[in-house]
Image (tube, grey):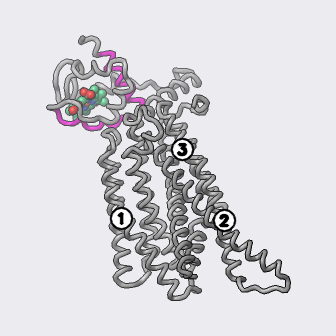
Amino acid sequence: MNFLDKLIIPLSPKHIMLLHYLLMLTFSLFILYISILLSGTFFSLYFKNKGVKENNLNKIRFSKDIMEVVTINKSMGIILGVLTLLTSILIFVQLLSLGQASAISYLFTSLLLLIIGLVLVYTYLYSLKFTEVFDAIKGFRSEDKSIEDEISELHSGSRHLSSSSGKFGFIFLFISVWFFIAGSTLPVYPDTFSAGNILSVLLSWLVISRFIQIIFISGAFTGATLLFAFFYWNGGRKFITEEYKSLVRSFSIRLTFTSIIILPVFLLINLVTLPNNSLSGAVFFYSSAALVLIFLAYHYLYVMIRNQEIKYALHVFITVIIVIITLVIKDQLALINANEIQTVEMGAKYTKLMQQLTGESNAPKISGEDIYKNICSSCHSFDHKVVGPPYKQTLPKYKGNVDKLVAFILHPTQNNPGYPPMPNPGLKPDEARAVATYILSEVKKYE
Ligand code: HEC
């Protein structure tokens, strides 16, 4: 994907963080939207089949109502689905270095499949509406026999169209989400997937376990959205019969409940499989926050089931949304950690570019020596052990690889047995680069 190179402009670390925040936003919106659409379509098809088989009008009606709730309206499909994914891809192109260009191709594939899926799903929605109209005029008699025939032909045609467009729409969305998960998983594990063909990526345990997680998220959010739309929005739907109401209520609560109860398992699997350099306090914090919120939602649902009431519909809806956003933030933080080196490299390019543009000398010079003397020297010396190991002993492995040293200084990991872990000195990326360059050149005197 060499043409993508041209799109990449060097960015300052601040801009990079801003893009990560933007990505949190577009990812959250996309995942929220695609989750309800995916399971919504699935369960709509399920109720349609059952309704037709059992000749149960409530189920057929629920099938159409589900689609109306989850598709919101036509422009939402474009704004929430296509635009958020497209924006995310453009941000990804900017953030990821070429090593992970394959991640971008997965996301592009996902976008194409999504567009096809959306067209089919909207076709499904409209044909459901037509079928309903035809159902209503079923007994229509006309003087002209040919009109009756034509109506009955259109009727079965719209039934057929709705079945096939719904099924294929679901399949396209399903595969689109799969590719999306693959594309957003790859950059978090830059070492694991360095060389692999599409199938080995799609079928890898890391991708599959995240995909299953999304499926459960999708179930939970769809259930919560149905509860919200039927029982809270605009004061709840008034026109529904008791029988229909209890069908919607018990299905939505059960769906949310079963999906959400399994979610923590996949959250833990996900956390355990994250590579070390992706982990940080913040990643743990957001994971725990998500867990607490999941239990809160679980509690509301339990009260609703026990008391046979629906008064917590709004609480569940909002809690599940926050759970999803929390999980997206957690994933993005892991991504930021995993791509520390790229961020540092790009920051360095940016500084160079700015220096060229502004004429070198204007920028205040950061002195690596000062930073070493003020901060590092309290724990380090070049030739003997202080609190940390002597540089003479630890720096040779960073020779010719400043970026790796910068990444270590920004996010120290435990590398030397027998020493306590190094606390994070809290430097900015360009300060870390200055001190790294300084100690690497200084250590030569001790060789
Ligand atoms: C509060 C004490 C402390 C301060 C301040 C400190 N370090 Fe460390 N540093 C340590 C300890 C302890 C270790 C050993 C940790 C380990 O690798 O397990 C260490 C390890 C290192 C290593 C070896 C890494 C490796 O991969 O083996 C380098 C390089 C390093 N520090 C550089 C720095 C720089 C540069 C600074 C100043 C910006 C700094 N340290 C500030 C305590 C400190």
Whether residue 376 can be seen here: no
Q: Residue at x 62, y 52 (%)?
A: 115
Q: Nearer the viewer, mark 2 or mark 3?
A: 2
Quick check: is 436 in the magenta stretch? Answer: yes
Name the residue at 54% across, 24% down: 355
Residue at the farthest bottom position = 242
Res 109 → quadrant: top right
Q: Looking at numbered disc 2 in the image, what kind of residue is underneath it?
A: Leu
Type of residue at label 3? Answer: Leu
Q: Nearer the viewer, residue 180 or 420?
A: 180
Q: Which mark is residue 107?
A: 3
Dot 3 beta carbon under 8 Å from ligand 1: no
* Front residue of 291 and 385: 291
Locate the C terminus by quadrant. Answer: top left
Q: Is residue 426 left or right of residue 177?
A: left
Q: Residues within 10 Å of mark 2 (few under 14, many from 20)?
A: some
Image quadrant where one finds the N terminus = top right
In the figure, is residue 397 to the left or right of 148?
left
Q: Residue furthest left?
A: 418
Circle 2: element type = helix
Q: Dot 1 lies on which element?
A: helix
Q: Are marks 1 and 2 in contact (CB under 8 Å)?
A: no
Q: Which stretch is magenta? A: 419-442
Instruction: Give the alpha-carbon distance from disc 2 to disc 3, as whole Å.
Output: 29 Å
Q: Position of residue 420 (x, y in %)?
A: 18, 36
On the image, the x and y values in percent for residue 317 come to 46, 69
